[in-house]
């Protein structure tokens, strides 16, 4: 159990700055995800937190104490690696118990503790196997077991699911969430998969090129993205963004794209700056009323169907419940739910909170 | 026509392979056969190769203490064993340091190491001989072991460094997180998974040390004569005792050829590594 | 300012301890003598009572070298020996490697066959060939006479030019396996799809060899050439066992000469000078080695320039 703080952390490799002035605070027992594409610095940050790499400047504090000088073990962190990093010449039992062996615990104590952890992770029948005799998912669990037995202050996860197939990924995700609920250890999770981040975390830190784009709850990140980048990065399929401008004058407030005016709630005050408009598929409504459009692409994904249509403002994707019988080139009408409209300052790309009148 | 060409090619290849095998193994087999025949059989025209005449007489005679072969084998064994053992210990540690332990200037050290392969032994033999005479190290096992170490180490380090670099860094990081000191990481994690290349390098070092001749004759006199020296002397002194001469050569070669064949997989893989790395 | 955490500091410290023993050995046994040898070659060393006197001799040793006929002949012989050996070994090794790369030759047995000559001690090899070359009872004479190629026993090691080449043959036999294995590894690194592409482009076997195989093993060929040259210059055991330089010094090569001058004739400074000449020759060869290994970028750069130009 511990709090984690990163204060003004900078990490450079030679002249190249990988992490730039990063600040973060993780409360006791929280599950925080560092989310971003490859190369954004998230793994570097994780390694820095773990003590596997030094930082160029800045502080890393665990429970208020600066730990920059300490190695990984002294920081009391445990890590689950991307490729599991199981010791190939040791059995599952030895792999999990290795850290205890190093501390010269008695054989009985080690056996006992390993057994408990193995049971919890359903590995008790596999204790005598070697890593190469295990499936990917089993290796994953051994890797987790090795971290759990440490009873550390902080768990670190480095994209642990990237080598699993899709179904296994979702299943293991659930197991990790349950584990966290059960053990309640402060956890930092690194991934590029936004679905994982959204489903597992208490808070998400979205990273881009070594900088923090946004730090918030999954809900905030999704429905109140701080920047265009976050809005685009989160959400599958991607949000559609249009260039236009607010129209003042007249009774109803609207946002004009080309020749079309999209009605916007009249309770809000139009912003002064130029803004772009973004809308997620679930807020794009197809039906009889609205702007004329023609169907371009129909992609069923089980519980939903994503229909991409071409309208005067460009293309936009709508989410339709269940199965849609629309065909390409068919004519439909599209409108946008007012509550789902997001506006982004065209210049600094930040999302504008539209004020109420 | 095409089928004919194909069978013809295959025939030529098979014949060439056969010829190659004969040329490669022939001399060796002839040596073994010679060593098993009595002198009379060898000196008759044509050589009397009747298997019934084969005998181990030559081998028995060769072990006569005045021939020095027996002590030669022992000396060679001691020297080769310690050369490869010590070479492995200090070579593997140096290789690991260069591969993983963030040593500054490791590139320069590597170049230096490569460079040691490329000069004639005689250059260092002369000064070494002078120094060792002065400190009284001539005719000691230690002298040869130390000198052999100096040419074995670069190869050991080169091969093992390549291997250690291929050990996933994640493994060592996991060990660090588990609480292992760098030394413990080396001892409990890296070494155990490196046994094959360690063996291969050790065998290679043993073979090189065993087969060495030049420094052996310069740095030894009476007490530490190696097998190579014994054979060379034999071939000079008793050169008309053909069977025995070959028997001594065969005896001194059995250990290294056997090692090479037993560990062939590792040695051959080492060649592949070497070609790729180069 | 970069801080180094404890773990990395420990690693660095361990690194120092780990490299120290090896470096110590290498520095004392190699570095020091190399320098000393250089110094010795400028001295005239005589035995006086118990020890040695060192007298500064300037370049005299080297001048004597150049004037000395034995040295000059040994030098020429060494060059001949090296050139011939390298060409012969490389050709034969390439054939062997190609054979072993062929589906028919892929069997592990053949590779083991190669290991046997390789593992032999050079001295054992010398003894073996001494027996084969034996004038009266050696198998070589026997086979040649039986086949009618020769009328009477040839004294292989008795005639000057012949002796040298018989030594060459013995060394070639021993040297081919290693180079063949090296080339074989290189051959196996040439990806199959290149051959397939060439065949699709209509190349026949010979053209595939020239345009796919040879370029693919270029680096290995260069390394093999340099390695083999250096080893050819180092030949010693064969001379010692087979001829000791006779007949009439016709089998004296540089390495052997240096040894003889130092340890038989006890002219240490002179011997050291010869050793250093040998050293320079090998050093230049190894420079070629290093050059050949690096500039692959410049090669491709020139290639693209050629295309644009």
Image (cartoon, rainbow, N blue to C red):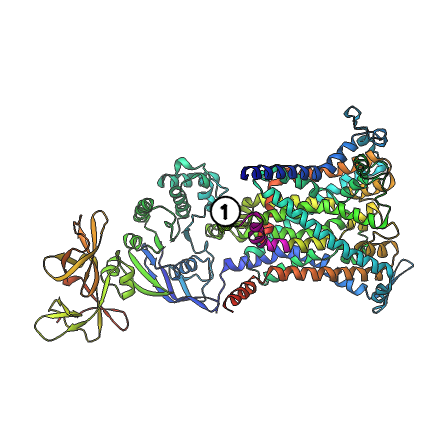
Q: Tell me the quadrant of the picture where the C terminus of chain A can be found.
A: bottom left
- Above or below for C37 versus C160: below
Q: Can you tell which quarter of the image residue A267 is in?
A: bottom left
Measured as percent of width and height from the top left, residue A331 is found at: 14, 57
Query: In the displayed image of the protein, which residue is found farthest to the right?
Result: C49
Q: Can you tell which quarter of the image residue A6 is in?
A: bottom left
**Label 1 sits on residue:** A102
Measured as percent of width and height from the top left, residue A292 is found at: 13, 61
Q: Can residue B266 be seen in this view?
A: no
Q: Mark 1 lies on which chain?
A: A
User: So how many labels did they put on this image?
Assistant: 1
Could you tell me which residue is drawn at 36 percent across and 49 percent down? Answer: A161
Q: Can you tell which quarter of the image residue A201 is in?
A: bottom left
Measured as percent of width and height from the top left, residue B66 is found at: 86, 37
- What span is colored magenta in the figure? C203-222
Q: Is residue B241 visible?
A: yes
């Amino acid at each position: 159990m511990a709090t984690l703080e990163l204060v003004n952390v900078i990490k450079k490799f030679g002249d190249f700055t990988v992490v730039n002035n990063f600040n973060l605070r993780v409360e006791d027992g929280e599950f925080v995800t560092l989310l971003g594409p490859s190369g954004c610095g998230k793994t570097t940050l994780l390694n820095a937190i773990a003590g596997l790499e030094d930082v160029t400047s800045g502080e890393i504090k665990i429970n208020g104490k600066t730990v920059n000088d300490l190695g990984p073990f002294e920081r009391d962190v445990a890590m689950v690696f991307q490729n599991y990093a199981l010791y190939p010449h040791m059995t599952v039992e030895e792999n999990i118990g290795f850290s205890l062996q190093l501390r010269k615990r008695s054989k009985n104590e080690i056996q006992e503790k390993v057994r408990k952890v193995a049971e919890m992770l359903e590995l008790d029948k596999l204790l005598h196997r070697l890593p190469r005799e295990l499936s990917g998912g089993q290796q994953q669990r051994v890797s987790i077991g090795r971290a759990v037995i440490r009873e550390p202050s902080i768990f670190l996860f480095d994209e642990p699911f990237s080598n699993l197939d899709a179904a296994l990924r979702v299943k293991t995700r659930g197991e990790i969430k349950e584990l966290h609920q059960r053990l309640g250890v402060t956890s930092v999770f690194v991934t590029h998969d936004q679905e994982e981040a959204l489903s597992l975390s208490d808070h998400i830190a979205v990273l881009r090129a070594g900088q923090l784009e946004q730090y918030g709850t999954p809900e905030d990140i999704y429905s109140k993205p701080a920047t265009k980048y976050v809005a685009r990065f989160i959400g599958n399929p991607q949000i559609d963004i249009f260039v236009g401008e607010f129209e003042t004058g007249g009774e109803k407030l609207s946002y004009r794209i080309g020749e079309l005016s999209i009605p916007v709630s009249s309770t809000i005050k139009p912003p002064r700056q130029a803004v772009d408009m973004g809308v997620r598929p679930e807020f794009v409504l197809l039906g009889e009323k609205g702007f004329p459009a023609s169907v371009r692409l129909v992609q069923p994904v089980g519980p939903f169907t994503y229909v991409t249509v071409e309208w005067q403002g460009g293309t936009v994707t709508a989410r339709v419940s269940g199965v849609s019988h629309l065909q390409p080139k068919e004519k439909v009408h599209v409108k946008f739910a007012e509550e789902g409209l997001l506006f982004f300052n065209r210049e600094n790309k930040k999302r504008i909170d539209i004020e109420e009148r | 026509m095409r089928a004919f060409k194909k069978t013809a090619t295959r025939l030529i290849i098979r014949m060439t392979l056969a010829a190659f095998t004969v040329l490669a193994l022939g001399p060796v087999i002839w040596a073994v056969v010679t060593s098993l025949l009595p002198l009379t059989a060898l000196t008759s025209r044509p050589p009397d190769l009747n298997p019934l005449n084969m005998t181990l007489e030559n081998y028995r005679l060769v072990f006569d203490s005045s021939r020095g072969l027996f002590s030669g084998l022992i000396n060679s064994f001691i020297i080769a064993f310690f050369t490869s053992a010590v070479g492995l210990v200090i070579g593997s540690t140096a290789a690991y340091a260069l591969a993983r332990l963030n040593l500054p200037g490791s590139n320069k050290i590597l170049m230096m190491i490569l460079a040691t392969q490329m000069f004639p032994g005689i250059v260092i033999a002369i000064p070494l001989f002078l120094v060792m005479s002065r400190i009284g190290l001539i005719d000691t096992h230690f002298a040869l072991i130390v000198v052999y170490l100096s040419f074995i180490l670069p190869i050991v380090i080169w091969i093992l460094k390549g291997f250690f670099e291929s050990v996933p860094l994640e493994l060592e990081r996991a060990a660090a997180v588990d609480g292992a000191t760098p030394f413990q990481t080396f001892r409990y994690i890296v070494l155990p998974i490196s046994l094959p290349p360690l063996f291969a390098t050790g065998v290679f070092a043993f073979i090189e040390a065993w087969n060495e001749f030049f420094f052996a004759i310069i740095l030894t006199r009476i007490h530490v004569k190696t097998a190579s020296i014994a054979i060379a002397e034999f071939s000079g002194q008793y050169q008309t005792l053909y069977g025995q001469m070959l028997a001594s050569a065969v005896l001194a070669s059995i250990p290294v050829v056997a090692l090479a064949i037993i560990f062939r997989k590792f040695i051959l893989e080492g060649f592949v590594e070497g070609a790729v790395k180069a | 300012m970069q801080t180094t955490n404890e773990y990395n500091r420990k690693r660095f410290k361990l690194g120092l301890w780990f490299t120290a023993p090896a470096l110590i050995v290498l520095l004392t046994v190699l570095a020091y003598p190399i320098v000393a040898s250089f110094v010795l070659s400028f001295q005239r060393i005589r035995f006086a009572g118990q020890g040695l006197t060192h007298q500064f001799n300037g370049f005299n040793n080297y001048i004597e070298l150049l004037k000395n006929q034995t040295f000059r002949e040994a030098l020429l012989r060494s060059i001949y020996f090296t050139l011939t050996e390298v060409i012969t070994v490389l050709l034969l090794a390439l054939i062997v490697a190609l054979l072993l790369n062929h589906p028919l030759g892929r069997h592990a047995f053949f590779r083991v066959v190669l290991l046997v000559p390789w593992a032999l001690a050079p001295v054992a090899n010398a003894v073996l060939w001494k027996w084969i070359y034996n004038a009266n009872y050696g198998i070589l004479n026997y086979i040649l006479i039986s086949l009618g190629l020769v009328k009477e026993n040839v004294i292989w090691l008795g005639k000057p030019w012949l002796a040298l080449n018989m030594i060459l043959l013995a060394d070639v036999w021993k040297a081919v396996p290693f180079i063949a294995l090296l080339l074989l590894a290189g051959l196996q690194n040439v990806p199959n799809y290149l051959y397939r592409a060439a065949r699709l482009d209509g190349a026949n076997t010979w053209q595939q060899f020239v345009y796919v195989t040879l370029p693919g093993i270029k680096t290995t060929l260069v390394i093999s050439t340099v390695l083999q040259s250096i080893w050819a210059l180092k030949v010693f055991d064969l001379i010692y066992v087979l001829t000791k330089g006779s007949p009439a010094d016709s089998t004296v090569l540089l390495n052997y000469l240096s040894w003889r001058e130092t340890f038989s004739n006890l002219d240490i400074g002179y011997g050291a000078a010869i050793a250093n000449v040998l050293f320079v020759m090998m050093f230049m060869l190894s420079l070629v080695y290093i050059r050949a290994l690096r500039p692959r970028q410049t090669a491709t750069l020139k290639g693209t320039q050629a295309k644009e130009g």
